[in-house]
Image: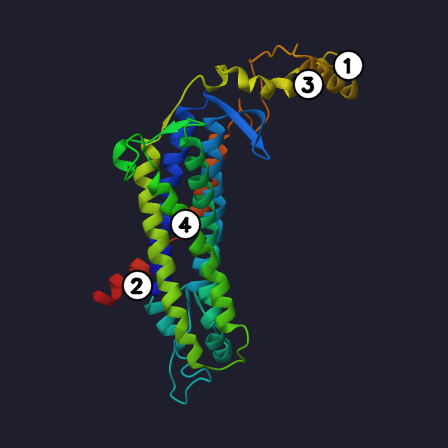
């Protein structure tokens, strides 16, 4: 019951952050930035793509969270020490009264879900943490003076003890570190339970510390993200710098291919122009396919999130609680 309530709380925060990321994506969809492979300048991207990528990542994280919710929202009560009871209890009644969707029927298996339930939830939390971790890592990189792609208000940064010019992205640095810790929890829970046979062991009490910590930390990270993401200011006209001219080499190769030149020949020709210092890019980017610069599929990604979020319905739980209190 604790787990399903906390999962619902986390899912609400994830949905809010998703909405903020999509809003930033749409607001900045025409602002181009460099895309990187191997941390080398690669191809044109945009803030629309950047923010939107993390929004869609959260939509898949929500699907994992919904799986964890469905797994958690099963009633183990009545399994006693793991072998049932001689009392003529009605396990279906407690399942209904407490608003569970189903029960763990086999009493031995009900006991075996200790650890399994926590690990399932931990993997879902780790998935969200992985998304936030990468977002934070990008933000730290993009805020550095060598990039200068984004800015945060002063209240979200800290200065230096001796360097008066510093505006350090501490919120993102701490988020990055905390999310690394969160991604390790599933492994810790696995190690606690990996050599246990069926039946109860005292080792299982050690699960609670990490299980509850995981909910607390992912909640705090999401709450901080909800404060900071709407306040990210993006820099425009980044690609006007000549250092980004080679971003458009693929565009030029493709243009020549579309005009009838074989790809191998177009690739070699553009490469020789770059080597000779004669490459002059056309910085007008025309991408139309689904999920590209010119077609972010924001509505489709929102539909994906809504479908996954709808899997976490708390109506049955609320109705059951209301009936009990009445």
Q: Is mark 2 on a helix, strand or loop?
A: helix
Give the numbered dot on residue 320. 2
Residue sticking out furthest to the left: 326
Whole-number angstrom distance, CA of label 1 to CA of label 2: 68 Å
The quadrant the C terminus occupies is bottom left
4 vs 3, front mark: 4
Q: In this view, does 149 lie above or below 227?
A: above
Residue sticking out furthest to the bottom: 86
Q: In the rendered image, which residue does mark 1 sit on? A: 261
Q: Is mark 1 on a helix, strand or loop?
A: loop
Residue found at x 32% / y 40%: 226
- Structural crowding at the residue carrying mark 3, measured as other residues with C-alpha within 10 Å and reported as few (<14), some (14–19) or many (≥20): some
Residue 316 appears in the figure: no
Q: What element carries label 3?
A: helix
Whole-number angstrom distance, CA of label 4 to CA of label 3: 41 Å
Whole-number angstrom distance, CA of label 3 to CA of label 2: 60 Å
3 vs 2, front mark: 3
Q: In the rendered image, which residue does mark 3 sit on? A: 254
Q: Is residue 195 above or below residue 138?
A: below
Whole-number angstrom distance, CA of label 2 to CA of label 4: 39 Å
Residue found at x 41% / y 63%: 73
Q: Which of marks 2 and 4 is nearer the N terminus?
A: 4
Return the x and y of residue 113 as percentages of the image width and height: 48, 71
Q: Which of marks 1 and 4 is nearer the N terminus?
A: 4
Pick the front one: 110 or 148: 148
1 vs 4, front mark: 4
Give the numbered dot on residue 177. 4
- Structural crowding at the residue carrying mark 4, measured as other residues with C-alpha within 10 Å and reported as few (<14), some (14–19) or many (≥20): few
Q: Which of marks 4 and 3 is nearer the N terminus?
A: 4
């Amino acid at each position: 019951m604790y787990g399903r309530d906390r999962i619902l709380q986390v899912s609400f925060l994830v949905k809010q952050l998703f909405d903020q990321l999509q809003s930033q994506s749409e607001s900045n969809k025409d602002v181009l930035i460099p895309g990187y492979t191997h941390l080398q300048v690669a191809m044109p991207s945009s803030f629309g793509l950047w923010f939107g990528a993390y929004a869609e990542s959260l939509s898949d994280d929500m699907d994992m969270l919904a799986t964890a919710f469905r797994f958690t929202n099963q009633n183990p009560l009545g399994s006693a020490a793991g072998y049932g009871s001689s009392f003529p209890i009605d396990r279906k009644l407690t399942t209904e009264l407490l608003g569970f969707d189903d029960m763990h029927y086999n009493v031995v298996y009900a006991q075996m879900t200790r650890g399994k339930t926590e690990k399932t939830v931990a993997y879902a939390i780790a998935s969200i943490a992985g998304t936030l971790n990468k977002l934070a890592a990008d933000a730290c990189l993009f805020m550095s003076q060598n990039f200068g792609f984004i800015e945060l208000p002063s209240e979200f940064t800290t200065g230096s003890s001796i360097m008066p010019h510093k505006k350090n992205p501490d919120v993102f640095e701490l988020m990055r570190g905390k999310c690394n810790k969160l991604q390790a929890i599933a492994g810790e829970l696995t190690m606690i339970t990996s050599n246990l046979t069926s039946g109860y062991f005292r080792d299982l009490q050690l699960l609670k510390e990490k299980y509850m910590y995981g909910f607390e930390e992912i909640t705090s990270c999401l709450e901080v993200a909800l404060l900071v993401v709407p306040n990210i200011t993006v820099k425009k006209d980044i690609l006007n710098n000549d250092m980004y001219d080679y971003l458009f080499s693929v565009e030029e190769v493709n243009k020549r291919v579309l005009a009838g030149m074989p790809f191998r020949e177009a690739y070699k020709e553009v490469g020789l122009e770059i080597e000779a210092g004669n490459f002059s890019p056309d910085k007008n980017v025309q991408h139309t396919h689904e999920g590209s610069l010119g077609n972010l599929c924001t509505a489709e990604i929102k539909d994906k999130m809504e479908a996954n979020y709808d899997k976490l319905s708390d109506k049955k739980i609320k109705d059951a609680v209301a009936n009990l209190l009445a």
